Amino acid sequence: MAYSAERNFRTLSKRSTLCPLVLLAILCASTPAYAFDKLLIGSFLDDGVSALARGGLERLPHKSETLDFHAPLSLDSQGHYRIETGYQGQLAARIYKGRWNGSRAGSERLDTAVAAPFSVMGGALRGSVAAGYDFDSVELKADNASEETFVHVNERFEAVKGGIFLQAFERVSLGVSILNTDYRDSPEIPLELEISPTSWLKFGYKHSYLDFAAEIDLSLTGHQANLPLELLETLDEFYGVLDYGALQVKYAQDLEKAKNRRLEARLQLPGSIYLLGEYQDREFAALEEDFTADGNPGGTLKGTLKRKEYRAGLGAQLSSRWSVEANYRHSDIAVNAGGIASSSAVAGFWPSLLVGNYNYLASAALDTDQYHLGGEYQGECFSFSLGAQYLDLKPAASIEYWRSLLFGLGRAGAETKQLSVDRIKMIFLSMGVGYQWKNLGVRYAVGQCIPISVHDTAESASSGDSGSGGGGGSDVFSSAWDKIKNYPGGGVQRLTLSVVF
């Protein structure tokens, strides 16, 4: 494949070709730019130090905190030489007790960037050039000894970046980047062009990329299989920005898929109160991959990934220094897949006529409700933020498989497996500090996820207790101390250092 990352992504199951846990892991991890970069917690927290510090949600309308080569208009150095270094460490989950004892997920990421400004034609044409380097390290280890299932990921990704920003007569802006990543044989070239006919109206075109990659090795009834997953998508969108008086609106439309769109808005009300909202709908490119069994052609996997999200919020600027904001965000993510596993890969041609090929249908979904509250203090040099989220997650995943009887006809050996965890409730608490001293700026934020309850129908079946989790299942937590000691959730920290001169 086009990326040269280290991998050990392995799933074991005696009875299923692709267990529901793997589908849910893929569903949570699909994200632009870096596969598995966000993992579990990152699926519910926006990028950036400030977003984490205020409780996990970015301000609207969205503005990049740092130089972003994937959105090259943000390479504007604003007339200064800039040096930036960013670090993110994320222990997304860890479990010390129960069926998933020993499971953990985490990642680390390091970004560096430099930018230098220039100006010609008496300032009518200005811009900046920039360069950077990124490194990602990701580990996912989920073990379930009772079901003989585990998922392991160990990846390393690198990216070298360069870019240029240009602005002419304060009316036309152009940004172009070039990224050499471990995902593709040829460099990615993100591009943005923006035209401002007036000071309150902008139109733009954006060409960007989405990368997702993993290799899955399966062991099934003594046979070995390999399934490569690769989603390398190119995105083209048109957008408009209205910033007139108290109203700010941005609408982006995918030029290839009419359903893919994004809308965000902010309305300043009389006084210090403001309203904000966001809606986005996205259908990703279809997956279609061939896999092998014992080194022979084993079959085909086809799948689709969709995501829909909306957000509504209310904020107040209490003074020139203090502000507070509350938000509600709902998101739906769904994966649907299916295919055929050839029995001839492991049984030989004539026996396979009797055994028949295996057919399977798989699906995974994650329904999430987020309730957010954040407050900020912005001083001349010092800044401070506090935030909290309550998350109600409803995961679901299943796989149905069967084999034909003869020559692809008939149905035998049918079975269905389902993810037993169907509801997770968590609290996410975070804080951040920032300080600007002359040319040096530093921002640091840390957040901790605290599980409240995990509703598991399998725990109920093994204990015979309906529990208090609702829906006839039980809560895997027996006490508050049990939650802290054995299911401490996950944490994330982000640090940015910048020098401007």
Image (cartoon, rainbow, N blue to C red):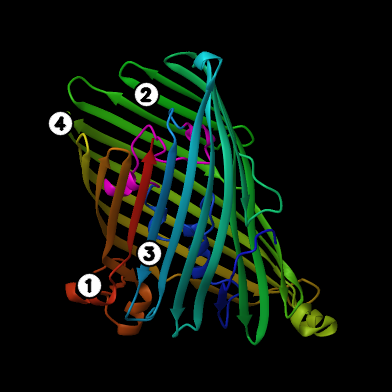
* Residue 117 point in image, percent of width and height: 49, 30
Q: First in sequence: mark 1 or mark 3? A: 3
- Number of the front mark, 2 or 4: 4
Q: Specify the principal SS of the magenta part.
A: loop
Q: CA distance from mark 4 to mark 3?
A: 34 Å
Disc 2 packing (10 Å; few <14; some 14–19; many ≥20): some
**Residue type pointed to by label 3:** Ala
Q: Residue furthest left?
A: 319
Label at residue 78: none
Q: Residue furthest top?
A: 198
- Mark 3 lies on a secondary structure that is strand
Q: Residue furthest right?
A: 350
**Residue type pointed to by label 1:** Ile
**Residue type pointed to by label 2:** Gln
332 vs 8, nearest the viewer: 8
Q: CA distance from mark 4 to mark 1?
A: 36 Å
Disc 1 packing (10 Å; few <14; some 14–19; many ≥20): some
Q: CA distance from mark 2 to mark 1?
A: 43 Å
Give the residue at mark 2. 248
Start and end of the magenta stretch? Answer: 47-76
Which quadrant would residue 220 be assigned to in this image?
bottom right
Q: First in sequence: mark 4 or mark 3? A: 3
Label at residue 484: 1
Magenta residue check for 59: yes
- Mark 4 lies on a secondary structure that is loop
Residue 38 seen in the current view: no
**Residue type pointed to by label 4:** Leu
Give the residue at mark 3. 92
